[in-house]
Every structure is written in structure tokens, then in C-alpha cells.
């Protein structure tokens, strides 16, 4: 039977993203992360442009250099999402979506040009140990030789569970940690009808991932995650989360006692060679009322930096960058290049054979259970839902199917009636959809 789509359907991107964030945070820990035999490229091959490679995680820095990296672009392939591209190229979800505001994150067309914002202005902080800028949800680690910086996107505390500011340090390193669930999180999950055990052992169901580094701030850690598609969002209870592959790299680099400075710097200005750049992000909600003050401060900083070289700031360009707040370092001197010019010159990166961590969906067999959603007349709407289910934490494998010009999403395979009922409830409650469990063909 073809079911009608609800008039309040959830296919607005903002609402979808909001539902994804909430669900990724609160979903019960039912299955583990997939493992993959391939690894990300630390240096990305360039097919056209001014260089042979572009760096994504490790950058050499000389002296007081303030800007690292370069803008790049990649052409999407079938079934890519912005989340998949972000993870492979060392970006968070917010990084890539604000840099590509006209693109649908969950239903990219094939051969779509996607901007990779792999250029960063370093935070104003001592280059010693770990510096975390909450405003752009990015961590910078300076090894002791101070000739390079490693940078990673992070997930941070959502409103009400804010990651604290200030100076602290790594007080321990724990591989394969168990998680003793705090009482406050116990209460939250009880209210959601999703009770947690007192202790979750190491393994694929552990939200700490496989590496954890407690901080001097009691109850706060830098750790991995079993829900990697929350990186680059405000999704945690205050801890700092990294992609599983990134936290492993950091864990191997840092030692107990490494200083950690946490700042909130949404507006950054710096000279890069002979160009003055401004990088802008929206302040996090906690600091939203300070936005005018923060913008005034960066304008003063720009005036100061321009005076050092007798340069003239284009204040209309400054206004544009502040209003856009897309995280892209943009020239702001008179007669400087605009956003269109610098993105047109971005390095073209070779698309890998397969993106790191990209969810795989197994074929359904006659012995598998599945869940079928209500129907869609728009193929793109069905594609969005399937992509979002595949990127939940934990994943609900899903694909869109078409029959007689009508589209549905089929989730599965599931191995039992019990598992199918649980998955159907997750989909129904999280997306406000009518769904139907489907028995294995062999049982009909």
C-alpha cells in the first residue's frame, strides 16, 4: 500500500540536520562501528593547480607564520555526502557545510564541485601543546619542536553542556577505556526511555571510542567516538570528540602533562605573505550576545595589522566576510581577490576510489528482516532519508527503492524480529515517520 507523506514532512535540511544531531546523541548503543581496511591520505593528490599535493592534517610552520594550508576542491561521485567528504579530507560537518552553502549535504549530485576549506588561521594562543578553538570546532596540536602543527576537527559540548574555556592539561592516557556513565547522563537517558548501564566496557558500543585522555577539568576528556558523523557539531556532554583515526594519531603524539588551552575565537585575522586575511565563524550560542563586541575587536585587529605595512583595508569586504561567516580565510585589502577569485584558484584534489569510513549497505537476502518507510513522490527526498539513516550512530543500513514512479526507503538487513522492531521504533520516533516491519521472504 502506498502511504501518504505527512504535510509536516521533515525534509527541510535544517530540520533534518537538527534531528540527526539529536538522534546521534541519544540513540541507544545497539551495534558497532564498521571497520575499513583502507586509510586516508595524509597528503592529497592534486590533479590541477599550483601544487602536486595539498596537506590536510600536518602543516609545517616557520617562525610566526599565522596561516597554514590551502583551499581545495573535489568532484563528488555517486552516493557521496558532505559528511563522507568531510571525514576523508580532515574536516568536520560544519566546516564543509558552511563552505558549501548551496549544496544539499545528504543528496549530492554526481560530479558536483565541492569546496574543501583546508586553509586555517591559527588561533591567538601560545604554540605549546594542544589549542582548541571552540568557535570553529578545531584542535591544533603543536609538538615540542614547534616547526609543525597537527590539526583535527572536533565535536564539542552542546548548549547546556558547554565545553569549558581555560588552561588545563592532559592528566592521563587510556587505551580501550570503559565508560562509567555520570548520574546526570543516566537521568537524561531515563527520561528518553533509553536507560544505560552503569559502566559501558571498551568496544564498539562505547561512546568514548578506543582512546581517551582525561583533562584537568574534572569530568572532561579528549576522546574518540563510536558516532563519527557528529564530529564538527555540538553534540557531546562537554567532552571533546575526534574521529577514531584522528584520536589515535593524537594519542600516539601527546604525553601526560601536555598543556591544553581552550579558547573561543570566532574571528581571526592574520597576514599571509603580502595579503591580510579574515576568517569568520558564527560565535557559539553561549557567546552570541557578545558578537558585536567580538566583531569590534577584530576590526581593531585588522586596523592594527594593516598599519604595520601601510596597507588599506576594504571595510565593505570585511562586512561581507563577517556576514558570510563561512570559515574561509578571505583577503580584505583594497583591490584584493574576492571569494569567487580565491575559490576559482583552489587546488583540484583527486577523488579516492572509496572515501574513508563511507557507510556500506549490504544487500538484502530472502532470510533478512527489513523496515519500509512511507512513500515519497520526490526521489531526492528518499535519497536524503536513506543517506541520513546510513550516517546515524549507530548506522541503520538503508537504500532508496523505486516502483511505478514512487520512492520508498528500505532499511535493513536485520536478523531478527526483535532487532527489526527496535530499528523501526528508532526511525519512527526520530523522523516522525510511519514505517512497516517486513518479514523475511522465506517466512511469508
Image (spheres, rainbow, N blue to C red):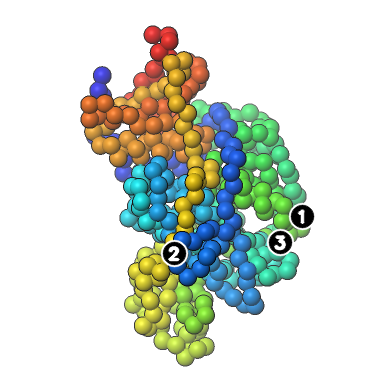
Q: Which mark is residue 256?
A: 1
Closer to viewer: mark 2 or mark 3: 2
Quarter of the image with the C terminus is: top left
Q: Residues within 10 Å of mark 1 (few under 14, many from 20)?
A: few
Crowd band around label 3 with a 10 angstrom C-alpha radius: few (<14), some (14–19), many (20+):
some
Q: Residue at x 46, y 52 (%)?
A: 351
Q: Report whether 438 appears left or right of 175.
A: left
Which residue is tagged 3?
Answer: 259
Quarter of the picture containing the N terminus is top left
The CA distance from mark 1 to mark 2 is: 43 Å
In x, y percent, where is residue 250?
Answer: 67, 53
Marks 1/3: CA–CA distance: 9 Å
Q: Secondary structure at mark 1?
A: loop
Q: Quadrant of residue 73?
A: bottom left
Q: Position of residue 32 (x, y in %)?
A: 58, 32
The residue sitting at 41% across, 27% down in the picture is 411
Tell me how many marks there are.
Answer: 3
For disc 2, the marked residue is 48
Q: Nearer the viewer, residue 346 or 176?
A: 346
Between 299 and 62, the one nearer to me in the picture: 62
Instruction: Please say if 222 is above or below 126.
Output: above
Q: Identify the disc placed on residue 282.
A: none
Point out the tag, 2 or 3, that comes first from the N-terminus. Answer: 2
131 up-or-down from 421: above or below: below
Q: Is residue 261 left or right of residue 90?
A: right
Amino acid at each position: 500500500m502506498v502511504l501518504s507523506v505527512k504535510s509536516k514532512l521533515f525534509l527541510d535540511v535544517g530540520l533534518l540536520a537538527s534531528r540527526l544531531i539529536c538522534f546521534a546523541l541519544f540513540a541507544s548503543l545497539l551495534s558497532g562501528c564498521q571497520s575499513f581496511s583502507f586509510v586516508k591520505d595524509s597528503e592529497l593528490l592534486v590533479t590541477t593547480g599550483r601544487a602536486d599535493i595539498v596537506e590536510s592534517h600536518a602543516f609545517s610552520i616557520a617562525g610566526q607564520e599565522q596561516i597554514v594550508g590551502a583551499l581545495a576542491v573535489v568532484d563528488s561521485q555517486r552516493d557521496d555526502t558532505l559528511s563522507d567528504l568531510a571525514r576523508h579530507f580532515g574536516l568536520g560537518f560544519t566546516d564543509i557545510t558552511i563552505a558549501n552553502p548551496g549544496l544539499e549535504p545528504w543528496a549530492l549530485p554526481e560530479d558536483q564541485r565541492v569546496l574543501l576549506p583546508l586553509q586555517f588561521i591559527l588561533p591567538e594562543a601560545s604554540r605549546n601543546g594542544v589549542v582548541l578553538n571552540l568557535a570553529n570546532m578545531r584542535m591544533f596540536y603543536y609538538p615540542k619542536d614547534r616547526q609543525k602543527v597537527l590539526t583535527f576537527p572536533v565535536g564539542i559540548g552542546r548548549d547546556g553542556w558547554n565545553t569549558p574555556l581555560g588552561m588545563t592539561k592532559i592528566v592521563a592516557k587510556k587505551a580501550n577505556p570503559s565508560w562509567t556513565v555520570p548520574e546526570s547522563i543516566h537521568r537524561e537517558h531515563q527520561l528518553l526511555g533509553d536507560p544505560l548501564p552503569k559502566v559501558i566496557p571498551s568496544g564498539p558500543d562505547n561512546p568514548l571510542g578506543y582512546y581517551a585522555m582525561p583533562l584537568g577539568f574534572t569530568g572532561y576528556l579528549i576522546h574518540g567516538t563510536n558516532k563519527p558523523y557528529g564530529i564538527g557539531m555540538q553534540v557531546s556532554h562537554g567532552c571533546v570528540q575526534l574521529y577514531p583515526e584522528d584520536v589515535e594519531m593524537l594519542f600516539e603524539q601527546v604525553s601526560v602533562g601536555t598543556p591544553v588551552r581552550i579558547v573561543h575565537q570566532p574571528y581571526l585575522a592574520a597576514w599571509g605573505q603580502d595579503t591580510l586575511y579574515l576568517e569568520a565563524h558564527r560565535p557559539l550560542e553561549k557567546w552570541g550576545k557578545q558578537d558585536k563586541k567580538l566583531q569590534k575587536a577584530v576590526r581593531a585587529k585588522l586596523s592594527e595589522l594593516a598599519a604595520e605595512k601601510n596597507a588599506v583595508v576594504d571595510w565593505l569586504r570585511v562586512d561581507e566576510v563577517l556576514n558570510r561567516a563561512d570559515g574561509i580565510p578571505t583577503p580584505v585589502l583594497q583591490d584584493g581577490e574576492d571569494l569567487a577569485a580565491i575559490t576559482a584558484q583552489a587546488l583540484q584534489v583527486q577523488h579516492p576510489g572509496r572515501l574513508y569510513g563511507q557507510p556500506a549497505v549490504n544487500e538484502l537476502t530472502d532470510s533478512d528482516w527489513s523496515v519500509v518507510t512511507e512513500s515519497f513522490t520526490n526521489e531526492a527526498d528518499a535519497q536524503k532519508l536513506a543517506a541520513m539513516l546510513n550516517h546515524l550512530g549507530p548506522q541503520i543500513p538503508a537504500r532508496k527503492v523505486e516502483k511505478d514512479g514512487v520512492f520508498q526507503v528500505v532499511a535493513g538487513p536485520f536478523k531478527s524480529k526483535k532487532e527489526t522492531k527496535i530499528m523501526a521504533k528508532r526511525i519512527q520516533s526520530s523522523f516522525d515517520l510511519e514505517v512497516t516491519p517486513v518479514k523475511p521472504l522465506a517466512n511469508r
